Image (cartoon, rainbow, N blue to C red):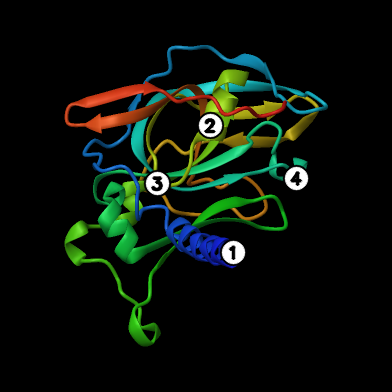
Amino acid sequence: MRGKLLAAFLVVAAFVWGHAGADPFLRAPIGAIAEEPAQASADRDAFDFTDYGFFAQTYRITPLAAYDVKGRVLHKRRYYSDKYQGDLIPFDLALGWRHLSDRSLLHEFFEFDHRSDTGGGRFLWMNWKTGEAGAVRPPPAGIGDPMAQLSNNHLIPSSKTVFRQLGAVKAGDLIRLKGYLVKVTDATRPEWEWKSSLTRTDTSTHWGGNNTSCETLFVTSVESILSVEPLRTAPMPEWFWPL
């Protein structure tokens, strides 16, 4: 009898856990980010950077702008394949601010996913949730343009510590990233270039390679936002990740 009760409990717990985990905003930290990302002139010259892949490769990184972004993590994806530059740019992180950092609004109206194409392109997919009978439920018109309140960020960890911190980030978190929007080149492939967007309002996609509307961020700092009013942050804990 005790064994049957335990089995039933585990089934119910697994069901509840699965459904609670299906929407990362359901139990996400409270708060919303009022500020848009801050961009300034780059204060660092171009430099060589060696990735953390098994077969480490060196790239030339040119900072285009200093960058400081605070937001809600809308979705995260880890890339491994060389085709998708997984060694150099292992994480894509979608961040939202203003209305797109409101967990209640996100839970009720939005769905997000990271996708890729066969040519190596990486992009963020967003859609409205559906209600009864499959009817689409678009968000209130008063929130403005959702696409101007989010960004998809291709992340280059500047150190192994930052790599592990980014590994610990999960959808629903409130975080702060600092670093540089960059252009990346490879001396062994002169025809190849991966370049960041420098504006939050572009939405075009370049299929088969770098998404030109995405931010490519060389990350120097990862912080967890503990409160938004007043803003209090702490270094993101490191999650062990074999390198």
Using the image, determine if residue 202 lies above or below residue 167.
below
* Quarter of the rendering occupied by the C terminus: top right
Q: Which of marks 2 and 1 is nearer the N terminus?
A: 1
Q: Where is residue 44 in the image (x, y as percent from the top left)?
A: 49, 12
Q: Which of marks 4 and 1 is nearer the N terminus?
A: 1
Label 4, residues with CA under 10 Å away: few <14, some 14-19, many ≥20: some
Q: Which of marks 1 and 3 is nearer the N terminus?
A: 1
Amino acid under disc 4? Lys
Mark 2, residue position: 166
The quarter of the displayed image where residue 198 is located: top left
Label at residue 83: 4
Q: What element carries label 4?
A: helix
Eye-nearest disc, 1 or 3: 1
Does residue 159 appear anywhere in the picture?
no
Q: What element carries label 2?
A: helix
Mark 3, residue position: 172
Horizontal side of 163 relative to 201 (left or right) equals right
